Image (cartoon, rainbow, N blue to C red):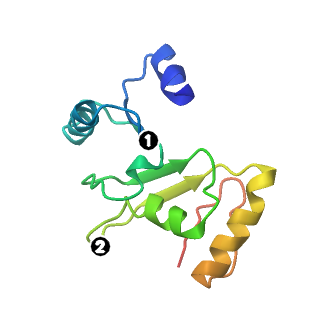
Amino acid sequence: MYVVGILNRAGINNSFLYSQLDATVRKLNITRFAEGKTNILIVTDVAARGVDIPLLDTVINLHFPPKAKLFVHRVGRVARAGRSGTAISLIAADEQPYLIDLFLFLGKPMRFAQDGDKYDSK
């Protein structure tokens, strides 16, 4: 995984999950993250559904998901039980239609923060 390699070369401790990873190693990496032994967990869409990671407060989408429901499942990992959370998405030009689809799916107007502005989703 590209991001894992970059973080490792920078000396940043991380854990990772992907579909071909052995289930035992997957559980070990989730445990390491949950216990605070690593504070970054890199995942593919294997963790978009069915993986509960307590106290997760931020999700960063390196590639914007092509389906609105997949986005909802990805960012649904944060801010459980009434807590607040942050979702950051890096969006390539060819992924912009996915963003428009998401806002149509959610029935919300699109709002953009300017550099330095704090975005409030309310």
Q: Quadrant of residue 35?
A: top left
Q: Which residue is denoted by mark 1 in the rendering? A: 43
Q: Secondary structure at mark 1?
A: strand
Q: Amino acid at mark 1?
A: Val
Question: Going by the image, does 74 lie left or right of 29?
Answer: right
What is the C-alpha distance between the residues marked 2 and 1? 23 Å
Is residue 112 among the parts visible in the rendering? no
In the depicted structure, whether residue 68 falls above or below residue 53: below
Instruction: Give the residue drawn at x 62%, y 82%.
Output: 108
Measured as percent of width and height from the top left, residue 71 is found at: 53, 62
In the depicted structure, whether residue 12 falls above or below residue 20: above
Q: Amino acid at mark 2?
A: Gly
In the depicted structure, whether residue 35 falls above or below residue 8: below
Measured as percent of width and height from the top left, residue 50 is found at: 31, 58
Q: Which mark is residue 13?
A: none
Instruction: Give the residue drawn at x 41%, y 64%.
Output: 76
Q: Quadrant of residue 62?
A: top right
Question: Going by the image, does 70 lie left or right of 47?
Answer: right
Between discs 2 and 1, the one toward the N terminus: 1
Q: Which residue is denoted by mark 2 in the rendering? A: 82
Crowding near the residue tagged with mark 1, few <14, some 14–19, many ≥20 C-alpha atoms within 10 Å: some
Q: Secondary structure at mark 2?
A: loop
Measured as percent of width and height from the top left, residue 32 is found at: 23, 33
Do labels 2 and 1 touch, CB within 8 Å? no
Instruction: Give the residue drawn at x 51%, y 20%.
Output: 5
